[in-house]
Image (cartoon, coloured by chain):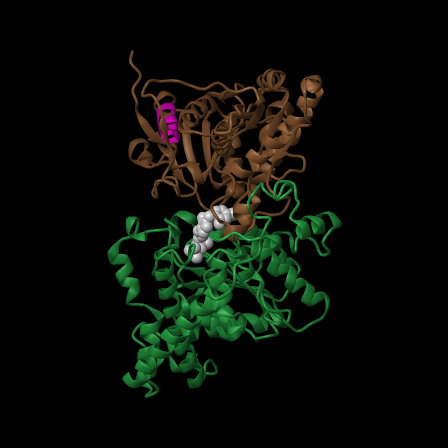
């Protein structure tokens, strides 16, 4: 079969994943603030109310802890909830449910009651939304055992990973970015899924390994293109899921390059970047020709002002500089 | 055993100035003076102009996003007038600008905030207002804590907290009400029920017939007022304030009003609201009835209207000038105010811009040289 050159937006890819899974499995429903009548605060669920009706596309009162907890119960009784947080920042209101209940339900019930809920929504800064509205939760939440965390960087993965997430028997935190919802990319019309725990090699080179996940993968690609102009070719690994983490692919690459820079849109302290670097040191120390570097945000709340927010976040220039440093 | 009534309650609805500008003289007694009403009406004109100019600024890219207050001015002004400036404390969400301005918050702070600059939330000292609360509902608990501090320190002061109808669905609302009543603190809960929470209508938010009745479960008093009626709002808030100050208990005021504009400039409410509904509420606009009332009392005329509108325009333009005249923050400022005292490591980062990712190598970001970047 010839591959269709179909290009769709990130938000459309998410919508297709949910709609296809809802057609396939009538246990799946979508609940959240503004998801139905409004077609989603960011238009991800556009048209889904029309297709699936108000029993499966449900506008919630402004009660994050409420609908997160309700999803736990519904999942325990066999349903497959998709819970949309308008922003992952507001999932903090639901911390007791999503961190203290969701990941432990199966464990505490001796394997009886799983919690196959997909929690999804916008994660990360860059939209000038101020510090309380710009959370990158992956650093904080990936510390908790019992959840899976998917974080796509492009429409193709968004669709494939979300389908996998919905079918998964474990709870999945699915992190999107408001800044990427309009990004277009190739998404085949044919059915496919993207498995968890398999990084994608986006660029190939032997000078250095760039490891990232989510939106900053795109900054890494820009940096790789920039570096190529001066003859520096790097591996860019898009992790796609943080839990499970495909450390094997990272080690394989580092073995080739001897250098690693981890790019992470979270704070540096106890971040996913810290974890990746620790594991690289534990398992690939002998391959390293330079100490591992990380490009995180500054260690302060996300600034609101545009120029400060820009300076705070990882970007192409910072990544290029870090790679050059490993080569110096 | 006979069945008896364990508890019964009812909720009153207070209206003093109806939508045609007709005043109930008896109920209005001891409320607002003529002077105060004229003052409030003039502020409505000023702040409506400010709202309009914010909207146009946003459309031309000079404002990041902005939640219009249009239609809710009487609720903010009536309640703001009832609280004592410099004594009582206001704990807002984001749709009661007029109350904050009355209590001394410079309007350019609000503009600066919505232009995307945290310095807009740096409230000048002496102004008893807390920063705008973005996570819905969180501020109500802060209000109760503030009021509790007043009580423990035996100060005769009172707190008012503002929130929307949608915010009553958050656990924070319920926990705040419960604490306020069990601790019996001097706090007034002021709900601006503007019928909508973005696209979710009030009926979908709660199955209660009124928001006010939620008070009863917590042992508070609930009252519903016509939120577009300056007099009713003022009277209910004054009573609630005095009752709270005297240790007489908590009042939840439900001000029935309407968000005449979009949720924010990022929204287009026409997609989910009936034109007929919007028009019926437009006729209840607080400005229309307040003006009618003033005219009927001979306190207002065309000439005064024209002058007030001129004043409003100049006022709004002045605020734009002031807020746009503030220089952009320096990159180094992102390290300020994180801790009471800046730790050595952050100080070093701030002073040298040699941080983890920013300027560890000055060529990294193009920022380190001047410490600034245009946007
Ligand atoms: C905890 C949290 N959840 C969701 C949001 C997104 N949000 C912003 S405003 C809003 C609606 C609030 O409605 P209401 O309380 O009635 O206030 P109104 O805007 O009508 O004045 C929502 C859901 C948020 N800011 N915080
Ligand atoms: Mg509302």
Q: Nearer the viewer, residue A43 or A305?
A: A305
Residue ID at (39%, 78%): B42
Q: Colour of chain A?
A: brown
> Can you give x and y, in whole percent of width and height, for residue B372 in the image?
55, 53
Residue A144 shows in this picture: no
Q: Nearer the viewer, residue B155 or B266?
A: B266
Along the line of sight, the residue nearer the viewer: A234 or B47: A234
Q: Residue at x 34, y 21 (%)?
A: A188
Q: Is residue A58 magenta?
A: no
- Asked if residue A248 lies left or right of residue B262, the reply is right
Is residue A250 placed above or below B271 in the rendered structure? Answer: above
Q: In the rendered structure, does residue A18 fall within the stretch colored magenta?
A: yes
Q: Name which quarter of the figure residue B342 lies in.
A: bottom right
> Which chain can be seen in green?
B
Q: Is residue A142 left or right of residue B255?
A: right
Q: Is residue A14 above or below residue B169?
A: above
Residue range in magenta is: A13-21
Indicate whether B73 appears above or below B211: below
Q: Is residue B103 left or right of residue A328?
A: left
How many badges with numbers are in the image?
0
Mainly helix, strand or loop, the magenta region? helix
Residue that extends furthest to the bottom in the rendered view of this protein: B298
Q: Pinpoint residue A72: horizontal percent, then vertical percent.
A: 53, 31
Of all residues, the one furthest to the left in this rendering is: B276
Visible residue check, residue B365: yes
């Amino acid at each position: 079969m010839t591959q269709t050159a179909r290009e769709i937006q990130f938000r459309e890819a998410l919508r297709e994943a949910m709609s296809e899974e809802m057609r396939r499995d009538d246990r799946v429903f979508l609940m959240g603030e503004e998801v139905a009548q409004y077609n989603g605060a960011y238009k991800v669920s556009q048209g889904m109310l029309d297709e699936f009706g108000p029993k499966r596309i449900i506008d919630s009162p402004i009660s994050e802890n409420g609908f997160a907890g309700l999803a736990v119960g519904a999942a325990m009784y066999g349903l497959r909830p998709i819970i949309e947080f308008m922003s992952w920042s507001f999932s903090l209101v639901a911390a007791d449910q999503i961190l203290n209940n969701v990941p432990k339900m199966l464990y505490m019930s001796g394997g009886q009651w799983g919690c196959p809920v997909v929690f999804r929504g916008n994660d990360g800064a860059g939209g000038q939304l101020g510090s309380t509205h710009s959370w990158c939760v992956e650093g904080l939440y990936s510390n908790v055992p019992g959840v899976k965390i998917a974080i796509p960087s492009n429409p193709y993965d968004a669709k494939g990973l979300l389908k996998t997430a919905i079918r998964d028997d474990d709870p999945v935190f699915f992190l999107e970015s408001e800044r990427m919802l309009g990004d277009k990319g190739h998404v085949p019309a044919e059915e496919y899924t993207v498995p968890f725990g398999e990084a994608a090699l986006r660029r190939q080179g032997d000078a250095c390994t760039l490891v990232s996940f989510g939106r900053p993968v795109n900054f890494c690609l820009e940096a790789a293109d920039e570096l190529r102009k001066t003859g520096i070719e790097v591996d860019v690994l898009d992790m796609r899921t943080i839990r499970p983490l495909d450390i094997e692919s990272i080690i394989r690459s580092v073995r080739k390059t001897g250098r690693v820079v981890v790019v992470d849109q979270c704070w540096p302290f106890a971040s996913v970047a810290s974890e990746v670097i620790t594991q690289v040191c534990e398992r690939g120390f002998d391959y390293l020709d330079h100490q591992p570097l990380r490009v995180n945000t500054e260690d302060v709340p996300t600034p609101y002002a545009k120029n400060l927010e820009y300076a705070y976040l990882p970007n192409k220039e910072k990544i290029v500089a870090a790679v050059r440093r490993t080569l110096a | 055993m006979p069945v008896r009534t364990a508890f019964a309650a009812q909720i009153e609805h207070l209206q003093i100035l109806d939508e045609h500008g007709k005043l109930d003289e008896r109920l209005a007694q001891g409320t607002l003076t003529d002077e105060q009403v004229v003052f409030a009406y003039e502020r409505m004109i000023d702040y409506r102009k400010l709202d309009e100019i914010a909207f146009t600024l946003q459309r031309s890219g000079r404002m990041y996003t902005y939640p219009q207050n249009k239609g809710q001015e009487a609720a903010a002004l009536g309640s703001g007038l009832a609280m004592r400036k410099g004594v009582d404390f206001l704990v807002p969400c984001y749709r009661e600008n007029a109350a904050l301005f009355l209590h001394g918050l410079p309007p350019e702070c609000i503009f600066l905030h919505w232009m995307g600059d945290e310095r807009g939330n740096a409230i000048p000292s002496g102004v008893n207002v807390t920063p705008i609360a973005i996570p819905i509902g969180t501020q109500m608990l802060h209000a109760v804590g503030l009021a509790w501090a007043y009580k423990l320190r035996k100060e005769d002061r009172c707190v008012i907290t503002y929130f929307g109808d949608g915010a009553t669905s958050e656990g924070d609302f319920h926990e705040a009400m419960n604490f306020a009543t069990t601790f019996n603190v001097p706090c007034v809960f002021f709900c601006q029920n503007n019928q909508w929470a973005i696209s979710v209508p009030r009926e979908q938010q709660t199955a209660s017939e009124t928001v006010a009745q939620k008070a009863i479960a917590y042992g508070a008093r609930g009252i519903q007022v016509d939120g577009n009626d300056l007099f009713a709002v003022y009277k209910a808030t004054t009573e609630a304030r005095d009752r709270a100050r005297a240790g007489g208990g908590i009042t939840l005021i439900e001000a029935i009003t309407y968000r005449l504009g979009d949720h924010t400039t990022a929204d287009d409410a026409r997609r989910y609201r009936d034109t007929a509904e919007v028009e019926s509420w437009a006729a209840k606009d607080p400005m229309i009835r307040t003006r009618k009332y003033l005219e009927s009392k001979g306190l207002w005329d065309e000439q005064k209207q024209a002058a007030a509108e001129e004043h409003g325009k100049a006022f709004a333009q002045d605020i734009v000038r002031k807020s746009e005249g503030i220089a952009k923050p320096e990159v180094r400022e992102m390290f300020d105010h994180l801790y009471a005292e800046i730790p050595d490591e952050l100080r070093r980062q701030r002073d040298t811009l040699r941080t983890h990712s920013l300027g560890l190598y000055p060529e990294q970001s193009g920022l380190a040289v001047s410490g600034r970047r245009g946007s």
